[in-house]
Amino acid sequence: MAQTLQQLKESLCDCKNCRLCEGRTNVVFGEGNPNARVMFIGEGPGKNEDEQGRPFVGRGGQLLDKMLDAVGLSREKNIFIANMVKCRPPENRDPQPDEMEACLPYLREQVKIIRPRFIVCLGRISAQRLISPDFKVTKQHGELYEKNGVLMMGTFHPAAILRNPNQKEPGFEDFLKLRETIKKECPEVYDL
Ligand code: URA
């Protein structure tokens, strides 16, 4: 059992638990503050992420960083960003259920080590797997759910906002609500 994030990261660099290992350039473990109180969980790496071995570094990632910055959050400072699957699905297709199940033990281990107070699901794929199987982002985005002591929120995936700019405003409102809730529940996030 890994004790630290670094050990966990090393243990999965040659993972072959599912077929996604066949096409990957790099495992995208995730990055951020290992003591973060807030975790963001996306879907899976795309082309840029696979090439660089880092989550959310393409256009969607740039938008995500801007929205985070606007509410005082950043991967350099006070959050950790990971994905449901750590290897790129071919042609950027959705990760398949068996691929997510194969990768879930790693995400669980990350959550166990980091022990966040908040988990924000970016998009339907992570919200349906982590909040509830029938989660509808358009209806339930921004709502808070408490699960095992963790406050969970689902919101729009940044790539969806890029495709659908009318989701930008409701998506940003979710971030503002997140900031207010963090200030109430975990004000130390903003002291880091
Ligand atoms: N989309 C995701 O869901 N995750 C990434 O890391 C990049 C794009």
Image (cartoon, helix red, strand yellow):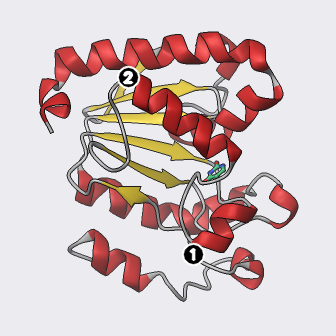
Query: At label 2, which amino acid type do we have?
Result: Val
Q: Secondary structure at mark 1?
A: loop
Identify which residue is drawn at 18% across, 14% down.
Answer: 184
Quadrant for the C terminus in the image: top left
Q: Which of the labelled discs sits on residue 75, or is there none? A: none
The reply, left or right, for residue 44 in relation to residue 177 is: right
Query: At label 1, which amino acid type do we have?
Result: Val
Q: Nearer the viewer, residue 29 or 20?
A: 29
Is residue 36 positioned above or below 86 on the image?
A: above
Quadrant hosting residue 186? top left
The residue pinned by badge 1 equals: 27
- The percent coordinates of residue 27 (x first, y second) are 57, 75
Mark 1 surroundings: few (<14), some (14-19) or many (≥20) residues within 10 A: many
Mark 2 surroundings: few (<14), some (14-19) or many (≥20) residues within 10 A: some
Identify which residue is drawn at 57% across, 25% down.
Answer: 155
Residue 111 visible, this angle: yes
